[in-house]
Image (spheres, grey):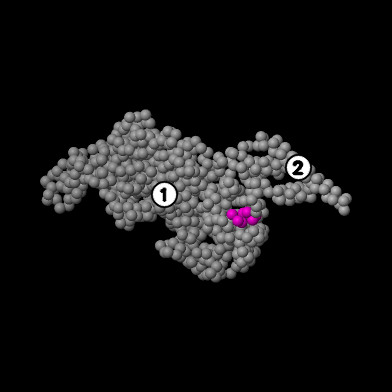
């Protein structure tokens, strides 16, 4: 008995000595390691790597840039069941231990001794926070001691809720998602607060191994992990048995949700990103900056939809080029005709393009039926662009075709969706119209399909192809120059070349209004008579004589200037430029802000031989829309940090009568600059919008350009039912470029259509056919709710009855007389009282 007591006492003393020794070792380690570690207090100043986000002026997301997807949230915003799931999975005693859990460490030590490697690690959430913020992830024995030391320090500094908040915002959870909120959006497309119990448990299972337990790439292992966490939640009392059973029975509903913008504006996103690099100092891609652009979300969406509809309409006129690829349907399982319940309805055509920063969906073949997966495997690498979805034709009926999308859903194409597909022939010609679906499609064809509302509430699927032609649309506020809509091509992800800003193309007749403005400034009037007749120019520099022609072989003879513009008569434009003179015309063009240094100084300028971008044309047309002021286009309203503090703000736009004073930050005329709390200026001095043509000339040109819409080459725009529209079509030789630039006094828009490698668009593809429909579709939406505004007639402009044949002031007895507008000091003389046209030869140019 005595020996037993002595033996027990010895064991106790030995244990105490061992514990004391261990404490001494830990204390020594702490004293040795603590000075070498980063200060735990720095965790209060932690800065998350938050991506750059770009928004419209009405705060709709356009684009996101950055390696890490993160949406920091506060502890109060985290649902309690999710917190319980995380604690059950990672650290049940989190709210009880001082940062280090002896039980966990003992378990880790036993595993280390037994397996000669670190298995579970025994890390608490606080230790993981220490590692994630201050240490590397390499598993070393010394690092574990560092974690312990830092965890103890962190627990002294922060409350438990603060530590858990840091953890939930920092952890990596797969697919570029950092933090719980980002993971909820990636896997379920919802905020963390809107998820269900099985979904919370699924996300809570990711920190241990984001790849191994990923619900997208490893759904079965993820389900097992989720169910174990639910069992642990029941053990801890967080849920009851019935809740656990229902949650465990729930299917795995995780799907990859790419960062989808609310508004499609990737071309603007790229412009804003590049401009911001020179405007603010912080790292753009990690500090959570917000760029608010000038885009109007409604108008931007309308621009994208109108541009794509216009290109598809052009593309269908020029025939079916065949499938993207062909797969051997005979080697694949027979799928049969899809039942109506199995077909996928077409989505809204206004949905933004699903890619952001070119993210790709993970391979989802494992989730598909075996037969469907066998088909999808054959065409899964074909890219989608814009509304185009890749599909494989699986069956063909007389006037229908069934197709399989890459996500395993099936669609049916009706005859109206196929019948347009005449075979494309050489030089823009098309073959005979198909009579059956088999004339166009066969099982195994890989094609594009797209949603097609067709004016109905229930969109259907339509056979489609990626247009080979391209287009650009840019729309400005004419009073400020703010870019309210911009689409630089069919799809940013198909081509990042921004044609709205970068494509220099010959302007054609869309350029003529600037030449006519020079004419009005040189003494011409809207009633001046110019002869529309053949011209021949001999030039030693040219191999052959230059014989300019019009769009048709018809000549109108003596024609009033107003009529010549709305009919777009080339020979009249040349005669006008020859009379005005190249130097005077260049002076006028320069005041419009056009890049005259790039232009040839010859008479071909009258026909629009100058190469310009759509932005340059839109800016110049803004002068007509706003009554004579030149504005500078701009793209960014302001830049904010993650807390909403304004780092940079766009300058105000102020009109001035030319010549304008140069305004700098030190100028007496400059308004008090806006500054931040440190006194640093965040807003540059005002931008001047100088008057470049007088109000009388501006009003007269507006009146003439309205006639282009009322009775000229832009008359299709009358279907918008507005009386305040004005503009001009443009087409270059052989229909290489098609344009329409037009406006209401509230909004300017320019559309260009052509091939990136200049080539003919085809016979009949003039500006009024290829470009104007896109402009109409855009403006129809963009001007909804905008009241019609007619610029007031200036005091210096008078209305006079004239003889339409002579352009002279009509006598009271002239029954054919019409009204025309003139400068008060430039009213034509009274027509002669005798019969005839009353013109002398010198009155006809």
> Which quarter of the rendering shows the C terminus?
top left
Q: Quadrant of residue 524?
A: top left
Q: Residue at x 56, y 60 (%)?
A: 196
Judge left or right: residue 811 versus residue 536. left
Q: Quadrant of residue 85?
A: bottom right
Q: Secondary structure at mark 1?
A: loop
Q: Residue at x 65, y 49 (%)?
A: 97
Q: Residue at x 66, y 34 (%)?
A: 35
Q: Spatial distance from mark 1 to mark 2, Cα to Cα?
A: 65 Å
Q: Is residue 243 visible?
A: yes
Mark 1 — residue?
A: 58
| Most common secondary structure along the magenta stretch | helix
In the rendered structure, which segment of residues is drawn in magenta?
Answer: 83-89
Q: Is residue 594 visible?
A: no
Mark 2 — residue?
A: 20
Judge left or right: residue 567 versus residue 223. left
Q: Secondary structure at mark 2?
A: helix
Question: Percent position (x, y) of residue 171?
Answer: 61, 48
């Amino acid at each position: 008995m005595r020996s037993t007591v002595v033996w027990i006492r010895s064991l106790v003393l030995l244990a105490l000595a061992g514990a004391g020794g261990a404490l001494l070792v830990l204390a020594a380690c702490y004293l040795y390691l603590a000075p070498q570690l980063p200060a735990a207090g720095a965790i209060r100043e932690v800065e998350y790597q938050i991506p750059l986000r770009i928004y419209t002026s009405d705060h709709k997301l356009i684009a996101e840039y950055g390696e890490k997807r993160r949406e920091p949230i506060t502890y109060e915003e985290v649902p309690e069941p999710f917190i319980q799931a995380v604690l059950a999975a990672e650290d049940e005693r989190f709210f009880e231990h001082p940062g280090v859990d002896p039980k966990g460490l003992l378990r880790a030590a036993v595993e280390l001794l037994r397996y000669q490697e670190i298995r579970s690690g025994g890390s608490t959430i606080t230790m993981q926070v220490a590692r994630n913020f201050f240490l590397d992830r390499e598993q070393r024995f010394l690092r574990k001691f560092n974690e312990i030391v830092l965890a103890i320090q962190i627990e002294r500094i922060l409350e438990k809720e603060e530590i858990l908040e840091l953890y939930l915002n920092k952890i990596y959870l797969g697919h570029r998602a950092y933090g719980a909120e980002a993971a909820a959006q990636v896997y379920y497309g919802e905020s963390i607060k809107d998820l269900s119990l099985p979904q919370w448990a699924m996300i809570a299972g990711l920190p241990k191994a984001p790849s191994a337990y990923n619900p997208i790439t490893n759904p079965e292992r993820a389900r097992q992990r989720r169910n174990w966490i639910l069992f642990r939640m029941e053990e801890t009392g967080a849920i009851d048995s019935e809740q656990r059973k229902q949650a465990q029975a729930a299917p795995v509903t995780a799907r990859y949700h790419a960062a989808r913008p609310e508004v499609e504006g990737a071309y603007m996103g790229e412009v804003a990103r590049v401009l911001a690099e020179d405007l603010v100092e912080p790292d753009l891609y990690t500090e959570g900056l917000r760029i608010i652009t000038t885009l109007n979300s409604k108008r931007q969406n309308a621009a994208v939809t109108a541009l794509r509809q216009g290109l598809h309409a052009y593309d269908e006129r020029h025939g079916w080029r065949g499938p993207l690829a062909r797969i051997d349907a005979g080697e694949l399982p027979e799928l049969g005709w899809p039942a109506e319940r199995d077909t996928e309805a077409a989505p809204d055509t206004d949905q933004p393009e699903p890619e952001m920063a070119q993210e790709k969906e993970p391979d989802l073949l494992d989730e598909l039926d075996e037969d469907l997966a066998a088909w999808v495997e054959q065409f899964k690498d074909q890219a989608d662009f814009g509304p185009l979805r890749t599909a494989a034709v699986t069956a063909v009926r007389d006037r229908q075709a069934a197709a399989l999308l890459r996500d395993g859903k099936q669609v049916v194409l009706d005859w109206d969706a196929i019948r347009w597909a005449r075979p494309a022939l050489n030089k823009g010609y098309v073959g005979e119209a198909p009579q059956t679906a088999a004339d166009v499609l066969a099982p195994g064809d890989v094609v594009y399909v797209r949603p097609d509302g067709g004016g109905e509430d229930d969109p259907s699927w339509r056979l489609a192809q990626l247009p080979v032609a391209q287009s650009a649309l840019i729309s400005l506020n004419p009073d400020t120059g703010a870019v309210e809509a911009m689409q630089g091509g069919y799809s940013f992800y198909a081509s990042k070349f921004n044609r709205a800003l970068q494509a220099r193309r010959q302007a054609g007749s869309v350029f003529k209004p600037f030449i006519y403005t020079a004419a009005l400034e040189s003494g011409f009037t809207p009633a001046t008579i110019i002869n529309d007749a053949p011209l021949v120019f001999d030039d030693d520099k040219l191999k052959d004589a230059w014989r300019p022609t019009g769009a048709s072989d018809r000549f109108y003879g003596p024609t009033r200037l107003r009529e010549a513009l709305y009919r777009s008569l080339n020979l009249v434009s040349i005669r006008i430029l020859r009379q005005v003179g190249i130097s005077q015309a260049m002076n006028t063009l320069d005041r419009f802000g056009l890049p005259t240094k790039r232009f040839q100084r010859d008479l071909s300028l009258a026909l629009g031989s100058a190469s310009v971008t759509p932005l340059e044309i839109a800016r110049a047309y803004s002068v007509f829309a706003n009554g004579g002021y030149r504005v500078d286009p701009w793209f960014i309203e302001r830049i904010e940090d993650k807390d909403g503090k304004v780092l940079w703000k766009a300058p105000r736009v102020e009109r001035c009568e030319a010549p304008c004073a140069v305004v700098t930050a030190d100028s007496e005329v400059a308004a008090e600059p806006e500054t931040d709390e440190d006194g640093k200026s965040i807003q540059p001095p005002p931008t001047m919008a100088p008057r470049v043509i007088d109000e009388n000339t501006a009003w007269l040109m507006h009146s003439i350009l309205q006639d282009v819409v009322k009775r000229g080459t832009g008359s299709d725009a009358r279907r918008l039912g507005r009386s305040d529209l004005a503009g001009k079509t443009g087409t270059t030789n052989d229909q290489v470029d098609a344009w329409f630039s037009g406006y209401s006094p509230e909004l300017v828009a320019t559309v260009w259509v052509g091939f990136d490698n200049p080539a003919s668009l085809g016979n009949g593809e003039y500006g009024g056919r290829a470009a104007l429909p896109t402009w109409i579709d855009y403006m129809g939406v963009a001007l909804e709710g905008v009241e019609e505004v007619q610029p007031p007639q200036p005091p210096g402009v008078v209305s006079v009855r004239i003889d339409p044949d002579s352009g002279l002031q009509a006598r009271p007895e002239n029954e054919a007389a019409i009204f025309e507008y003139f400068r008060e000091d430039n009213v034509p003389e009274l027509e002669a009282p005798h019969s005839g046209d009353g013109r002398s030869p010198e009155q006809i140019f």
